[in-house]
Amino acid sequence: MAINKNVEKILNEQINAEFWSAYFYLSMSNYFNANGMPGFANWMKVQFEEETFHAMKMLDYINERAGRVILDPIPEVPSEWSGVLNVFEETLKHEEEVTRLINGCVNVAIEEKDHATVNFLQWFVDEQVEEEATVGEIIDQLRMFEGKGHGLYMMDKDFKTRTFTAPAE
Ligand code: FEO
């Protein structure tokens, strides 16, 4: 059964939001590179890869359900922040907004009685819990290290090792 039009529409909007997130984090990665923090830059590059994965996962799903993917322009992303803590605070704010958007997608799928999409979206619901928790922990650590160069240096060193692994389907 082809995908419901309202579900198709909101998932298309979500694809755009996921690509925007990818751009947002890639911009943060460049900000860190320009400010001598290669580990944080790497962490954000992996974040970019994760968001691209999210967008593609949704895109593949629409195609699988015989729907139509329309790629809209990606709105401009910020390129300047006031420091590491500010970047991660903005990241958390953004992820909270993404959680709201994902919940909105689930609501539409429920309204349209599209159980396959409700199921499909559960992966994203779980992913958001994890994303918010991870970023929240980083913010706690950064607040602890505030004004302490060594802690920040150690974190930067640690973040150099983060790699992207596509989650199992
Ligand atoms: Fe695609 Fe960071 O949620």
Image: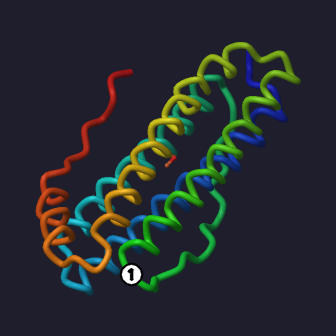
Q: Quadrant of the N terminus?
A: top right
What residue is pinned by disc 1?
Answer: 83
Total marks shown come to 1
| Amino acid bearing label 1 | Gly
Q: Quadrant of the C terminus?
A: top left
Report whether residue 48 is seen.
Answer: no
Q: Residue at x 62, y 51 (%)?
A: 96
Q: How far from the left and from the top, in percent, is residue 36? A: 19, 83
In the displayed structure, would residue 131 be above or below residue 109? below
- Name the one closer to the observer, 159 or 108: 159
What sort of colour scheme is used for the picture?
rainbow
Quarter of the image for residue 156 reads: bottom left
Tell whether 126 sits left or right of 2: left
Q: Residue at x 74, y 20 (%)?
A: 2
Q: How far from the left and from the top, in percent, is residue 47? A: 36, 54
Q: Residue at x 21, y 70 (%)?
A: 152
Q: How far from the left and from the top, in percent, is residue 41? A: 26, 69
How many residues crowd around disc 1 within 10 Å: few (fewer than 14), some, or many (20 or more)? few
Q: Secondary structure at mark 1?
A: loop
Report whether residue 122 is seen.
Answer: yes
- Name the one closer to the observer, 19 or 131: 131
Tell whether 56 sits left or right of 149: right
Q: Residue at x 37, y 66 (%)?
A: 143
